[in-house]
Image (cartoon, rainbow, N blue to C red):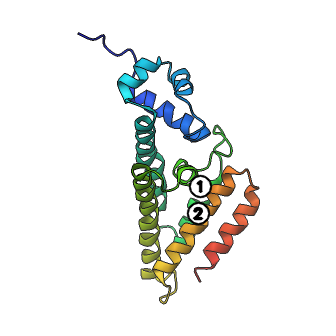
Amino acid sequence: MGRPRQFDEQDAVVRATELFWRRGYHATSVRDLGDELKLTPSSLYRTFTDKHTLFLRALDHYRATESAQAERLLAADDRPIREVLRDWMLWLVTCPPDGEPGKGCFVVNTATELGTADARISERTEAAFEVTRQALRALLLKGRGKGELPAGLEIDGAVELLFTTVLGLRVRERAGHDQARMGTAIEVAVRALG
């Protein structure tokens, strides 16, 4: 009979997510993971099989938390649609007072680091991107329906423009660009809706 685990597996996934998010997949070694999670390599392999499997769990955790939070922020309440959109985009690039500057988005970081070379990772990044597109689509449709956006607004094109802007903002945030300049880009993107 094996010894019981002496650690919280979900806590280990959360901590691994933070490490992968900061450093990326390739720059994070099994030794780094062991040090961060306070696990021996054998415990790490016994629990998570390998680094790749733990990375997939980290992406899933991120999508279930950060991506879901972004989706909730985009859910239009009684505020004007442009205000909801502007606040959400500013939230994306504003580092919280207790957070690390320049982390960017774990999903965007992963997509730029690993591209489409790994089908399981690509599937997860694309699913996260689709959540964002659908949330944007719902917000714009609501805005058009309420008369806050032009009746002739081409929704699919506007979604792609905003989605591309968001990805660019996340990369710029990771690169440490000036938040005021990103704020200007956000204002222009929101005004472009008509």
Q: Given the image, on which type of amino acid does mark 1 rest?
A: Leu
Three-letter amino acid code of the residue under disc 2: Val
- Spatial separation of the CA atoms under disc 1 and disc 2: 8 Å
Considering the numbered disc 1 on the image, is that residue within a helix, a strand or a loop?
helix
Residue at (38% x, 14% y) in the render: 6
Where 99 sits versus 48, above or below? below
> Which residue lies at the image location 65% right of the left edge and 51% below the top edge?
94
Q: Is residue 132 left or right of residue 178?
A: left
Q: At which x and y percent is residue 100?
A: 65, 39
Quadrant of the rendering where the C terminus is positioned: bottom right
Q: Name the residue under label 2.
A: 166
Q: How crowded is mark 2: few (under 14 residues within 10 Å), some or many (20 or more)?
A: many
| Residue placed furthest toward the left | 1
Residue most extreme to the front: 117
State whether residue 123 is above or below residue 145: above
Q: Residue 186 carries which label?
A: none
Q: Position of residue 152 (x, y in %)?
A: 49, 90
Work out which quarter of the rendered image holds the N terminus and state it.
top left
**Which residue corresponds to the image point at 51% horizontal and 51% vertical from the top-left?**
107
The residue to which callout 1 is attached is: 92
How would you rate the neighbour count of disc 1 (Cα within 10 Å): few for under 14, some for 14-19, many for 20 or more? Answer: some
Q: Is residue 76 visible?
A: no
Looking at the rendered image, the disc whose residue lies closer to the viewer, 1 or 2, is 2
Q: Is mark 2 on a helix, strand or loop?
A: helix
The x and y percentages for residue 105 are 57, 50
User: Disc 1 vs disc 2: Cβ atoms closer than 8 Å?
Assistant: yes
Q: Residue 76, image x and y in percent?
A: 45, 66
